[in-house]
Amino acid sequence: MKKRIFAFLATICLGCGFVLFAACDQTPDNGDKDNDNVVNTVVFEKDTVTLQQGGWTRLLFAATLENEHVEFTSADESIVTVGATGYVQAYGKTGTTTITITGTESKASDTCTVTVTEIALDFPDTEEEGILLLDSSAGSFSSQMPDHLTVSTDEGNNSVTQFKYDAEAATGGENWNNQIYYTALGGIDLRECDSISFNLRGSGESVYFQIWNGVQQKSISTTATAGYGWTQTTLAFTDEQKTLLDPAESPLIIFVVPYPDAGYDGNGGTVELCGLWLSGYEHIEKELDIPSGEDVLRLDDQEGAQFVLENSAMNDHMTIAPDTENPDITKVTYDETAAADTNWSNKVRLDPAAGTVFHTSNAICFNIRGNGEAVHFQVWNGTKAVVAQQVTAGAEWNTVTVTFDDEAKQDFAASDTLQVLFTIPVPNANYSGTGGTVEIGGVWLSGYTRPEPPTYTIPDAGIARLDGSYNNGGEVTNSKNGEVITINYPAVSSDASDDWGNYIQFNVSEDASRTGYNQFELNIKGAAGVRVYVKLAQSDWTSIKEQAVTLTGEWQRVTFAIETEQQQHLAGGLVVALYVPFPGTAAGTFDIAGIWLSASQAA
C-alpha cells in the first residue's frame, strides 16, 4: 500500500510540474503509511527504519507544494542525528526515536520511527579448535599515562574493559605515551598462531595496535576503528613477522588510545574492548630446558650459590624454596604486601660464586613462569644496573635472554662484585592482592668463554723471601715441585672447635734489611670456599699480621699491609704459619708458591 501511495503522490506532483524526493543509499526495513491527501503535504516513503549502531541511511520523501523547503529534526540525538538533506546517522546509543520532516512553507509534516540496534559481538567459540582466548579483563592491562588514560571494568558488563582518555592522552603527550600494555601474555608463544583479533567500540576513534619487540626494535601493527558499534579487527602474521614474536624476546601487546593527533575535540572519551584472542593456535606444552656445554656457565648451581631475599623487611612476606620434585626449580612465593611494596624491596638475589666473570659472555639467560606477573630483572654491580629487563612470568616456561653490549662487558670487567636480582613482582602492577608464586628454572651465562686461569708470579727483585725452611705440624704432609709446595690437610669435624694443631710452618732467620718493607704477600691456590688462616709472627709467636683467606679455586696473590709500628719487628727472626682449622672443613690440599715481604709504591 505504501509504495502505491508514494507513487500516486509522485504522479500528482508531476502533473503539477513538481516532485521532490531523494536517492537512497541503503534500503532499511520498511513500514506502511496510509495517507490519501496529497495537497500541501510532505510524506516520508517509510514509516519505520531499522539501523545498526554505526549505520546510516537517507530518508526518502515527497512534497506536493512547489518550491517547498523542508527541515528534519530528531527527537533524540543521542540515538540518531539527521542532516539537512535527510541523512540519518546511528552514531550513538541503541533505542527508538522519531525523525520529523516539516515543510517550511506549508507547515505540513510527517514522521518516521527509527530503531537502532546493537551490533552483535562477533566472538569466537572458545571450544573451537585453534582459538585461544586471552584474558582481556582490566587487570590484564596497565597504562603508561595513568593520570590521563585509565583502565577499568564496565560496571554493567564485567567482560568489557574501558580505556578512558582525556585531552592530554588524545594527543599522545609528546612521544605517543598514551599506550595501554597488555600484561598477561606470559610465556604464550605467539608464533604458534596465525592471527590476533579483538573487538572495539567507541566514538569513531582510531586506535593504533602493535606487537612490539624491544630486542629487535621492530613491531607488527595495524590501525583499528572504535566505531559506535562493536567492530572486529584481525591482524594476521606472516612467517617473516613471526620472527618478532619469540617469547624469549618478551614481545609486548600495545593499544595506543586514541591514535595521537587524530583530530579529536579535546574533551576525551572512552574506547571499549571486549575480547582478545588468538586464531590458528597450535600449542605445544613447553618443558623446562636448561642448556649445557662449553659455552654455558650455570650460575644457580655453583658451589655456594643460592637465592636469598635482598631485604630482611620481606622475611614475613616472601619465601624462597627449591621445588621438591625438581631441584633445578626455585619457587619464590609472595603475599599481598610484597606485591604492593612501594620501595621495590621485594627483591630476590643470586650471588655468583667467587671468581665468576661475566664479561667473557654474550648474554645472561633464565627460565621463569608464574601467573602473569611482571618481574624486573637486573645485574647490579654495586653502583648501577649494568643490564636490566622487565619480563612476564606467564603460565608456561619463558626463556629470557638479556644480551650484553660492549659497554656492559666493559662495566662487568671493571666490577669486583656482581649480583643477579629479581623484583618479584613489579610493585603496583594491578595484582589481585592474594599473592602468588613465581618459579625460576635455571640462570646461566651463554656464549661463555672460560678465561685462562691465572698463574702465579714471584717478583724478581725488591722483595725478601720468607719461604726457605719449613716443617709440618699435626697430620699435615707436604710435597714440593719447583716453587710450588702442596700441603695436604686433614678434615675438621663440623661439631669440633677450631683446630690449630695442623699447620705448615716456615722459619726465617734475622735480617736487618727487612725493616724497609710494609707488605706481606704470598701466592696461594686451593678449592673454592676453603678458608686458610695465615699468620706472620716474631720468633716467639708474637703476632705481626694474621688473617683468614678464602680460596677461589685459582691462583691468587694475597697482600697484607704491615702497620708502621710492626715494621721494626721484621728484622728479627720470623715465623710464617698456615692453618686450615675451621670446623666442617673436608680433607684436601692447597698450594703455596712464594712467600715474601715487599714495599708498596706509596711507602
Image (cartoon, rainbow, N blue to C red):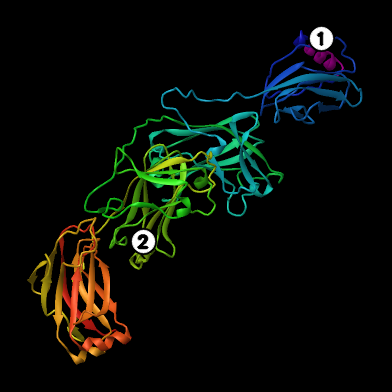
Q: Residue at x 36, y 58 (%)?
A: 404
Return the residue nearer the eye: 557 or 296: 557
Can I make out residue 457 in this image?
A: no
Q: Residue at x 22, y 50 (%)?
A: 293
Relative image position of residue 172 (x, y in whole percent): 61, 49
Asked if the stretch drawn in magenta spans residue 11, the answer is yes
Can I make out residue 449 in this image?
A: yes
Q: Which residue type carries mark 2?
A: Leu
Lateral position of residue 206 relative to residue 495, left or right: right
The range drawn in magenta is 5-17
Q: Quadrant of the N terminus?
A: top right
The residue at the far bottom in this view is 512
The residue where tag 2 is placed is 418
Q: Which residue type carries mark 1?
A: Asp
The quarter of the displayed image where residue 164 is located? top right
Sooner in the amino-acid sequence: mark 2 or mark 1: 1
Asked if the stretch drawn in magenta spans residue 230, the answer is no
Q: Residue at x 36, y 61 (%)?
A: 418
Asked if the residues shown at circle 2 and circle 1 are in contact, with their CB atoms under 8 angstroms apart, the answer is no
Relative image position of residue 119 (x, y in whole percent): 62, 24
Would you place residue 540 above or below residue 394 in this image?
A: below
The residue where tag 1 is placed is 34
Relative image position of residue 149 (x, y in whole percent): 62, 45
Measured in 3D between alpha carbons, the distance from the residue under mark 2 to the one under mark 1, in whole angstroms, is: 89 Å
Would you place residue 349 above or below residue 188 in this image?
A: below
- Number of marks in the rendered image: 2
